[in-house]
Image: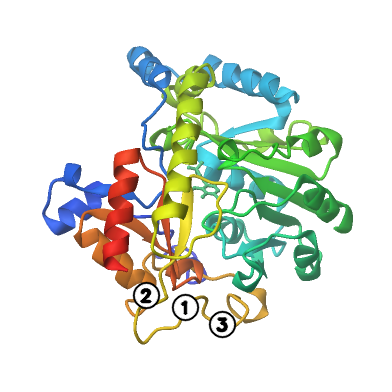
Amino acid sequence: MQPRDLSAHSVYQAGRGNEEVARELGVDPGDLIALSSNENPLGASPKAVAAVREAADSINTYPKASHADLIERLAARWDVAPAQVWLAPGGDGAIDYLHRALLDPGDRVLVPDPGFAYYAMSARYHHGTARAYRIRKAEDFAQTAGTILDAYDGERIVYLTSPHSPLGTEISIGGVAEIADGTDEETLVVVDEAYGEFTDAPSKVDLVRERDDVAVLRTFSKAYGLAGLRLGYLLAPGAWADAYARVNTPFGVNKLACRAGLAALDDDDHVERSVEAVRWAREYMYEHLDAPTWESAGNFVLADVGEGVEGVEVGERDEDGAGDEDGEPRRRSTAGGTDASPAAAVADACQREGVIVRDCSSFGLPGCIRITCGTREETERAVEVVNRVV
Ligand SMILES: Cc1ncc(COP(=O)(O)O)c(C=O)c1O
């Protein structure tokens, strides 16, 4: 007895956390600084933490009212109808719901390379396939409508990530509209705004209100600091009526997450402090890292540490920064990439000095590491360690 053939599927590898690394190194987790998963260094919204404590006594009942309340709140916040808010266990869960609702077997999605691995993984789980468009280092990782439309070949969904992780670049609202205009009527353009709170650019949600072929993905994991609760949502086209109700896992979002989300939405102070901390840390890294960096609109900075590491070339695996031939996106079965890459060597050496950063080899960037914005103290220490290692 075996599961179905899963050989085409890969294992998702997240950035390494301090508890996991501490166990491996036999040190105290408190002695490590984890800046590898773009988590919020200020912690969760205190109002959300209080709401979780309060709701703990009632977890014997299903999350009926809290789920409905959070959907109402988000609909009001974004000025869309409640049916357009697809609440899910994390942005990842919202991607799954979208694929359940949209993909017929064999349908294709178009994803960025480098980019977030789960778009393609989830499409495959839902009997779809994925192709990739390239975001090139030679073009400073610019995301333009032209490049994406050139790669487009009738896919059912086109994924855009703005701000992009790990690159930090964005696409303009005009660029998104141009892509939506240039693709088929039955193609949905999804703008992943997981890092949307950290940019000064406006959300693309205006396009969700104006047209029926654009959706926006948001999460409570980053600016709200609720990554451990798994809470995210899709803002879907208004014309889709009850599609969410038809594909949604019953009670897929737990009560603590719903109550925390509601409380976090009332905690502007925490979001403002989180965004302010990120602005400071980004500037500090641009200025003080002894490695080239790219300007970032997210809560992290990408640094080129390939320079100066002997015997290995900087940058991507091939000349134009592409993944596999034929637009097949990279399958990230290893988080750390190859041991030979400069990024792996640097990340490894930093880890031994107590700072965990993300080796971007698995994104196809073996010369780059991604450093999450920490508190001032954490960021200063990370920069000191990276500089020493580089
Ligand atoms: C670009 C991007 N999209 C979506 C997500 C999903 O986040 P979550 O499932 O925690 O909401 C992440 C997580 O790091 C991400 O980097």
In screen coordinates, is 353 left or right of 282? left
338 and 117: which one is in front?
338
Q: Nearer the viewer, mark 3 or mark 2?
A: 2
Q: Which residue is mark 3?
A: 318
Q: Earlier in the sequence, mark 3 or mark 2?
A: 3
User: Would you call the spot at circle 2 few (<14 residues within 10 Å), some (14-19), or many (20 or more)?
Assistant: many
Residue 159, quarter of picture: bottom right
Do tag 3 and tag 2 residues touch (Cβ < 8 Å)?
A: no
Tell me what residue is drawn at x 38 percent, y 77 percent.
341
- Report the disc number at residue 287: none
Residue 247, quarter of picture: top right
- Report the disc number at residue 342: 2
Q: Which residue is mark 1?
A: 314
Q: Amino acid at mark 3?
A: Asp
- On screen, 75 above or below 362? above
Is residue 63 visible in this depiction of the protein?
no
Query: How far apart are the two marked residues, 1 and 2, measured between alpha carbons?
Result: 8 Å
- On screen, 161 above or below 256? below
Query: How far apart are the two marked residues, 3 and 1, measured between alpha carbons?
Result: 11 Å
Q: Amino acid at mark 2?
A: Pro
Q: Residue furthest front?
A: 287
Percent of width and height locating residue 380: 31, 47
Query: How far apart are the two marked residues, 3 and 2, measured between alpha carbons?
Result: 15 Å
Q: Nearer the viewer, mark 3 or mark 1?
A: 1
Q: Would the CB of label 1 be found within 8 Å of ligand 1?
A: no
Do tag 1 and tag 2 residues touch (Cβ < 8 Å)?
A: yes
In screen coordinates, is 213 left or right of 197? right
User: Would you call the spot at circle 1 few (<14 residues within 10 Å), some (14-19), or many (20 or more)?
Assistant: some
In screen coordinates, is 102 left or right of 277? right
Q: Secondary structure at mark 1?
A: loop
